[in-house]
Amino acid sequence: AQTVTQSQPEMSVQEAETVTLSCTYDTSESNYYLFWYKQPPSRQMILVIRQEAYKQQNATENRFSVNFQKAAKSFSLKISDSQLGDTAMYFCAFRDYGNKLVFGAGTILRVKS
Amino acid sequence: NAGVTQTPKFQVLKTGQSMTLQCAQDMNHEYMSWYRQDPGMGLRLIHYSVGAGITDQGEVPNGYNVSRSTTEDFPLRLLSAAPSQTSVYFCASSSSPQTPREQYFGPGTRLTVT
């Protein structure tokens, strides 16, 4: 069974600085998808970024980028120019071709002014 | 286009009571699923459906039933509520399982069982 591990329960960063959230996963499959979801206090799950495992290029979405290391089974999220609105719980998730998502336990990110 | 809707937003049940959490989507998505979110554990898959009339179990199915009679609706039934089912429940949907599409989540239902 696939597992996703987020080793940082909580992190904080100063506004405008850069922060990296870690995620590792375990799978025997070669084709899969990885996601980062953001959950603000409103509880809504918001997709931040996704990565297809067959693509070597790291995904980027504005201030959000990932460092995908397939051999190491690592998928970290980098947030540049952190903003107060980035304060949220962040979940790393793995999806196999069966479309089932497996989530990590989450990292609480607090952006300080 | 309302996306994924869930009702109710909050619910308190007594142990042994039954209830149904409603989920509906208007995007004609084939794939729908239910997750529960507990502190420190992320979201865990309860049941999922790949189309009308087809359902299957996820990681934590015990104590829950689902059915999928239409593409739009995917209700989750608690047969006899237990305090261990106190959680936040999310419904999600996406288009064909074989395409790399994101899952769209509903706003969640906070359930407390006393």
Image (cartoon, coloured by chain):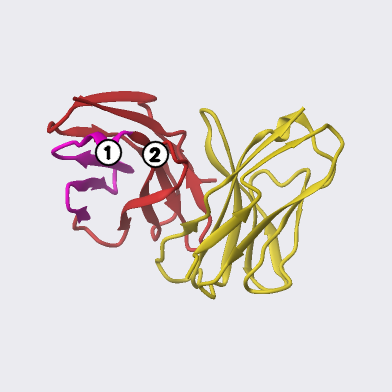
Chain colours: A red, B yellow
Q: Which mark identifies residue A50? A: none
Q: Residues within 10 Å of mark 2 (few under 14, many from 20)?
A: some
Q: What residue type is labelled 1?
A: Gly
Q: Where is residue A108 in the image (x, y as percent from the top left)?
A: 37, 29
Q: Mark 2 points at which residue?
A: A40
Q: Which residue is drawn at 19% across and 54% down?
A: A60
In the rendered structure, are the residues bearing label 2 and label 1 in contact, judged by CB atoms less than 8 Å apart?
yes
Residue A39 appears in which quarter of the rendering? top left
Name the element at disc 1: helix
In this rendering, would A101 be left or right of A56?
Answer: right
* Chain letter of disc 2 in the image: A
* Chain letter of disc 1 in the image: A
Q: What stretch is highlighted in magenta?
A: A59-87
Q: Mark 1 points at which residue?
A: A85
In this rendering, would A7 be left or right of B79?
Answer: left
Residue A104 appears in which quarter of the rendering? top left
Residue B1 visible: yes
Q: Residues within 10 Å of mark 1 (few under 14, many from 20)?
A: few
Q: Position of residue B62 (x, y in %)?
A: 76, 43
State the separation of the CA atoms marked 2 and 1.
Answer: 8 Å
The quadrant the C terminus of chain B occupies is top right
Residue A98 visible: no
Name the element at disc 2: loop
**Does residue B100 sit above or below B59 in this rendering?**
below
2 and 1 marks on the same chain: yes
B70 in magenta: no
Q: Earlier in the sequence, mark 2 or mark 1?
A: 2
